[in-house]
Image (cartoon, rainbow, N blue to C red):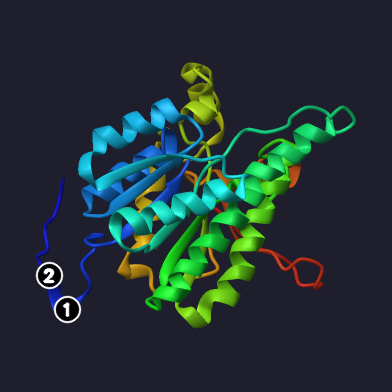
Amino acid sequence: MSTATTPRPHGLPDRSLNGKVAVITGAASGMGLATAERFVAEGARVVIADYNAEAGQAAAEALGDAARFTRCDVSVEDDVASAVALATDAFGRLDVLFNNAGIGGAFGPITELEIDDWDTTFAVLVRGVFLGIKHAARVLIEQGEGGSIINTASIAGQGGGAGPQAYSAAKASVINLSQTTALELAPHSIRVNAICPGVIFTPLMHSGDESDAEAMVTELQPIPRRGEGSDIAGAALWLAGDDSTFVSGQAITVDGALLAAGPRIFGRLKNTRNVHRMVGMTHGTTGQAPTVRRL
């Protein structure tokens, strides 16, 4: 575990999380576990809050004295409040809350979805984030030292076609909730941001069939490697630390340029097929002729 405290050049703040305390929901596996491991390596103490008691307890034991575990259903307010209370009881304070717990949720044709499945999806993915923000903010406001709240959204919440309807709508809600609460909590120097992962190889994502998932990534994702939990942990580390104290209300995309690729229309439509052979400028419907130079 890294505990280095060597100051950075020119008086810039240390990148580590020495002395900080974080609660991470959904931290028994995947992105949450990778983040818990990274936070502890950077000097933080963490509360692992997860529905899976066996995996969560094992994760906390592996991380040693810097970690505690509590079973947590993030859709249940008492569970979320207890996770936040464990941080202050065990470690004396709270600095970071990472609302990361998630499920795949309801899927299938919109005409066939069951309302209970829809409601459960939103209970975990949206109500869970609301409860985390609510109870973390109470502690952070009382401490009076600011803090960082990080919410896991998704590129599925940034447009259509990147996930099932319920999941996508829920993640869009997380992005908006992050923005609105960032404004509300800014006077207390409490920052609220969302991370929007793309295809990240976790048990939730591949359900045990990694080869099929990798084939899909190779076809669709511009950066030719698979996303890992450590990629999300790195983004969370930055948002949790002192280098991002002027960053709030943002949805930070971590997806190997998948969202930037969009529908991949350019170069496929008839009038753009030979674009790689030309350079120039088009002016739309202004009446000005395009300028084109063949390469």
Q: Position of residue 21 (x, y in %)?
A: 32, 58
Q: Is residue 193 left or right of residue 273?
A: left
Crowd rating for badge 2 (residues with CA inside 10 Å; few <14, some 14–19, many 20+): few
Q: Residue at x 34, y 44 (%)?
A: 36
Q: Residue at x 31, y 69 (%)?
A: 242
Residue lying at the far bottom of the rendered structure: 187
Label 1 element class = helix
Give the number of the disc on residue 73.
Answer: none
Residue for badge 2: 7
Residue for badge 1: 11
Near-viewer residue (80 or 294) = 80
Image quarter (top left, top right, bottom left or bottom right) of the N terminus: top left
Residue 120 visible in image: yes
Number of numbered discs overlaid on the protein picture: 2
- Amino acid type at circle 2 is Pro
Near-viewer residue (141 or 43) = 141
Q: Is residue 40 left or right of residue 248?
A: left
Residue 264 visible in image: no
Crowd rating for badge 1 (residues with CA inside 10 Å; few <14, some 14–19, many 20+): few
Q: Residue at x 15, y 70 (%)?
A: 8
**Residue 28 higher or lower than 10, as above or below:** above
Residues at marks 2 and 1, CA–CA distance in whole angstroms: 7 Å
Q: Residue at x 11, y 58 (%)?
A: 4
Q: Position of residue 173 (x, y in %)?
A: 69, 55
Near-viewer residue (23 or 113) = 23
Q: Are marks 2 and 1 in contact (CB under 8 Å)?
A: yes
Q: Position of residue 27 (x, y in %)?
A: 42, 40
- Amino acid type at circle 1 is Gly
Residue 201 lies in what quarter of the image? Answer: top left
